[in-house]
Image (cartoon, helix red, strand yellow):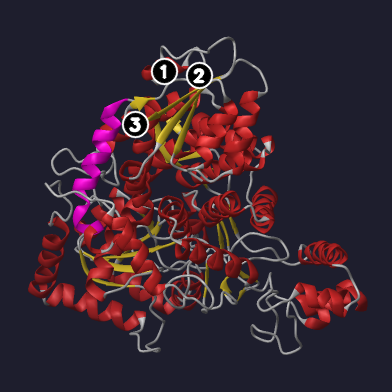
Amino acid sequence: MRKEGELLTEHAPNRLIHEKSPYLLQHAYNPVDWYPWSDEAFEVARKENKPIFLSIGYSTCHWCHVMAHESFEDEEVAKEINEKFVPIKVDREERPDIDAVYMKVCQRMNGQGGWPLSIFMTPEQVPFYAGTYFPKESKYGLPGIKQVVGYLSETFHQDPQQIKDVVDSVKKSLNQVIFSKGDARVTKEAADQAFHELGKTFDTLYGGFEGAPKFPSPHHLMFLMRYYQQTGKTLARQMVEKTLNSMAEGGLYDHIGFGFTRYSTDEEWLVPHFEKMLYDQALLLIAYTEAYQLTGKEHYKQISKQVIEFVKREMTSSEGAFYSAIDADSEGKEGQYYIWGRKEVFQVLGDELAGIFTTVYNITTEGNFHGKNIPNLIGTDLKSIAEQFNLTQEELHQKLEEARVKLLKAREQRVYPHLDDKVLTSWNAMMAAALAKAGQVFQQDEYVEMARKATRFIEENLVENERLMARYRDGEVKFKGYLDDYAYLIWANLELYDAEYEVEDLKRAKELASQMYELFWDQEHGGFLFNGLDSEQLISNDKDIHDGAAPSGNSVATVVLTKLALLTGETHYADWAEDQYRVFYPALSRIPQGSTYFLISLMLTEYPSKEVVVVDQEDDQWDKLKQFKQTHFLPHLIWLYKEDELSKVAPFTKDYSGIDNQTTVYICENFACQRPTTDIDQVVEKLSHDA
């Protein structure tokens, strides 16, 4: 048995070797004597009176790799860490609850956060120092990890009062009740304010919000499309289209293999951070699909279908579940898998095809990324290039597709980046929601079936004792599901219902909503907590409303509860959503643009919405209605399809029946229904006024 603090050789695995997380396994042969997050680690720290070094990251994180290579694989650094600290490694994607607590501490201590997240804390799990990436030796204006470890260990043992003062301050900060139900509530003025604030930070030249680095923020775009649909303010639509067009033209989009990378390091979306995350594919698929509905522009449909093609090819398991992420690095270099030398393009394509491709995709001898090229369409005028090569635009597109397929085949001979193949419930549900929506809009049963396979996988593999779980990998299910898992899975079920009108989807959404409320609702202050009441209790249980790279659990929960209230007519869902408007009023009144997805629920309640109940008599009229629904962006319309079982989950539809054996439509608004009609043309005309 190895002694505590004993230096590991490159051949001796540490405790992480028994874990399933790809991130933890990346560190299983470090000389750092890592523990997974466990009672054992904290017990050792208490017994030996050592502080804890908590390192949080994820397997496709570039700077996590850098710190690992510089420090965690270095025996000198490892010796320092092992002697003076109990080191713990955490995969933030498996344990977002741990990450949320300590990221908040880091942000409060330093004004910013990020990954790798480096936390130095007491055996009681309370931080006294926090940072992100530390180099091995001091540089970039950052202290070196060796200096930090030495100084903090000395302070911990020789100046316990200083440590106690910091710890007390951290405890006090974490115990402050930031969100609590009050009398004031969010109103639609928050949506107006969010629109104006987004307008202030909108980049009119390249699209997107704020400066570099630029993140896609698809939830902003979803909000703006709904805001435009309700208010008619064209700037909202213009911001959406400019951003979607620019992202698809830049290097953020993989023009060879499709799919979006995580963010752009520059303002014009040219140089991406090359990792590909499942949640980005899901949320951007929704944004481009809805933009197609809103504008009818084929380009958005094409991008949507290409994203699905990429996910199906590279991020889908044989069982139909979706993998988490693909690394930015390969062969030790960022973007190595994705970049091209001009000469290489000519070797693969031949002179004629390469001449066209390099002109269209801005491939030059000097390159745009470390002497190589990121293919992009920034500033490209396809019409003039077609004329330059004496081609019709259709012929040009055919040649570009021929070139793309050849380059993809050549690229597949390269060393493929690391694939994080763990299955996360929340991200899979997000992707299922996106596919169900795309399947409905594009009338593609295959996409809906992909969504169903993913949700079936969750139901069959990620539920234990009726409790939703968070992660599956290599046959192992682990960690009780978080708020996000429940909220996103409800979303997926509602999108599946909207695609195929199977009552079981609506029934499952209701069951999950009840479980979500029971497990996560803060009975004292209101709002949904991140960790369930039956989960491991950390030093703080986060209650977040801020939408980060993806909408927060509270944002999604509020939207799905609002939709459930409209779909079922059961008012307790609306009551729960109303409580959310009161709990999160302080945040939404100050920075509404920080929670744009939350505002989607507000727009369903504060602006006019309608329930459309269809009693189908198996004539062609329902097909006419579906065609209308698929081709119009009408997010404020809630559709129900009447069948025998519907009244069990939506009791208000109990007495709705067809007239004269014809398809009959009931339109309800403000808790009152109009006279039913069999005049489907009149229904389409009436609903068209809402478009």
Q: Which residues are magenta?
A: 570-588
Q: Secondary structure at mark 1?
A: helix
Amino acid at dot 1: Thr
Give the residue number, with chain letter if any, for mark 1. 653
- The N terminus: image quadrant: bottom left
Q: Secondary structure at mark 3?
A: helix
The CA distance from mark 2 to mark 1 is 7 Å
Which residue is outermost to the top? 660
**Sequence order check: which comes first, mark 2 or mark 1?**
2
x and y percentages locating residue 7 in the rendered image: 41, 69
Residue 596 vs 251, above or below: the answer is: above
- 374 and 93: which one is in front? 374
Callout count: 3
Residue 5 vs 617, above or below: the answer is: below
Tell whether 402 sits left or right of 128: right
- 611 and 365: which one is in front? 611
Q: How many other residues sit within 10 Å of disc 2, few (<14), some (14-19) or many (≥20)?
A: many
x and y percentages locating residue 149 in the rendered image: 29, 77
**Sequence order check: which comes first, mark 3 or mark 2?**
3
The CA distance from mark 1 to mark 3 is 13 Å
**Sequence order check: which comes first, mark 1 or mark 3?**
3
Magenta segment includes 46: no
Give the residue number, with chain letter if any, for mark 2. 642
Give the residue number, with chain letter if any, for mark 3. 565
Q: Secondary structure at mark 2?
A: loop
Amino acid at dot 3: Ala
Task: For the residues labelled 2 and 1, say whether their Cβ atoms are less than 8 Å apart.
Answer: yes
